[in-house]
Amino acid sequence: QKLKEEQKRLTSLAQGLVQYGKMQKQLADAQETYTSVMKKAGQLSREYEAKNRAFLDEQAGMLAQTLQQGMPCPVCGATEHPRPAEMSSQAPTEAELKQARKQWEQAQQKAQQTSQTAGAWKGRVEEAERTLTQQAAVLLDGVSLPDAAQQAAQRLDQRKTETEALEADLQQEEKRLTRKTALEQSIPRQETQLQALQQKIHQQEQDLATCRAAVQAYQK
C-alpha cells in the first residue's frame, strides 16, 4: 500500500513536470509576442511623432506665409520675422496624421494586453515551480527541478518493479493459501472415506475368519 501511494505521488509529480514544461513554453511564446508587439509599437510611435512634427512644421509654414514685417505674429507676438518657417512638401495630411495616431494607439493597447498575458503566464509558472519544488524535495530527496523529471521517471521505474515483485509474491501466497484451504476442506472427507474403508476391511476379515472356521470344521 505504501509503495502504491508513493507511486501515485511520483506519477502526479511527473505529470506536473510535463505540464510545467508546457507552461514554460507558453510563457516564452507570450514574452516573445510582447517583445514583437512592443517593437512594432515603438516603430509606430516614432512614425507618428515624425508625421506630427512634419504636420506642425507645415502648419507653421502656412502661418509664415501670412506674416508681414512690422505686424505682430499671432503666435509669438514678434513684429520682425527674420526666419519664417518654410512649407514642407512631405508633410502628411490631417487624415494621414490621425490614421498614424490611431495605429500607434492600437499598438500601445495590444502591447498592454500582451504584457498582461505574459505576466499571467509568469505567475502561473512561478506558482507551479514552487509547488513542484516542494514535491520534489519530499519525494526525490531535494533534487533540483531541472533534474526532477529524470529522477522521477527512474524512481517510478524502481517502484513499479518493486510493486510487480510484491504482487507476484502475493499471487503465489494466494495460490498456496488456496491449496491449503482445499486440503483442509478435503481432510474430513478423506477421514470419512478412510473410516468406511477400515470398516469394510474389518467386515471382510470377520467374513474370512468365519470361512476359515467353517473349512476347518468340515475337514474334521
Image: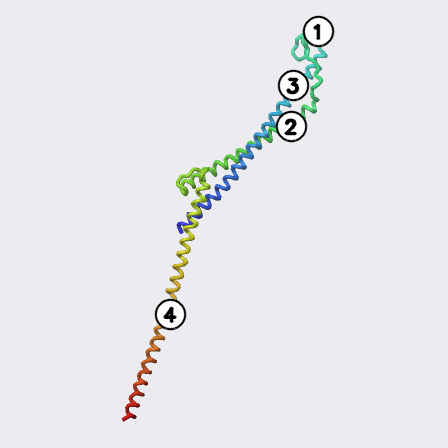
As measured in the structure, the alpha-carbon distance from the residue carrying label 3 to the one carrying label 1 is: 26 Å
Residue holding disc 1 = 69
Residue 141 image-quadrant placement: top left
Identify the residue at horizontal 30%, vertical 90% (top origin).
215
Residue bearing mark 4: 186
- Of discs 1 and 2, which sits in the foreground? 2
Sooner in the amino-acid sequence: mark 3 or mark 1: 3
Q: CA distance from mark 1 to mark 2?
A: 42 Å
The answer to which of marks 1 and 2 sits earlier in the sequence is 1
> How far is disc 4 from disc 2 in space, using C-alphas?
93 Å
Query: Are there few (<14), some (14-19), or many (20+) residues within 10 Å of tag 4?
Result: few
Q: Say whether residue 135 is left or right of residue 98.
A: left
Q: Give the residue at mark 2.
A: 103
Q: Residue at x 53, y 33 (%)?
A: 119
The three-letter code of the residue at mark 4 reads: Ser
- Nearer-the-camera pick, 142 or 208: 208
Q: Residues within 10 Å of mark 3 (few under 14, many from 20)?
A: some
Query: SS class of the residue under badge 3?
Result: helix
**Residue at x 67% of width, y 18% of height:** 54
Of 17 and 107, nearer the camera is: 17
Is 101 placed above or below 11 here?
A: above
Based on the displayed image, in which of its 4 quarters is residue 196 positioned?
bottom left
In the image, which is nearer the foreground, mark 1 or mark 4? 4
- Mark 2: few/some/many CA within 10 Å (<14, 14-19, 20+): some
Image x and y of residue 106, in percent: 62, 29
Q: Say which of marks 4 and 3 sits in front.
A: 4
Question: Sequence-wise, which precedes: disc 1 or disc 4?
Answer: 1
Identified by mark 3, the residue type is Arg
User: Vertical placement of 168 versus 25: above or below?
Assistant: below
The disc, 3 or 2, on the residue closer to the chain's N-terminal end is 3
- Residue type, label 1: Gln
Identify residue for label 3. Answer: 53
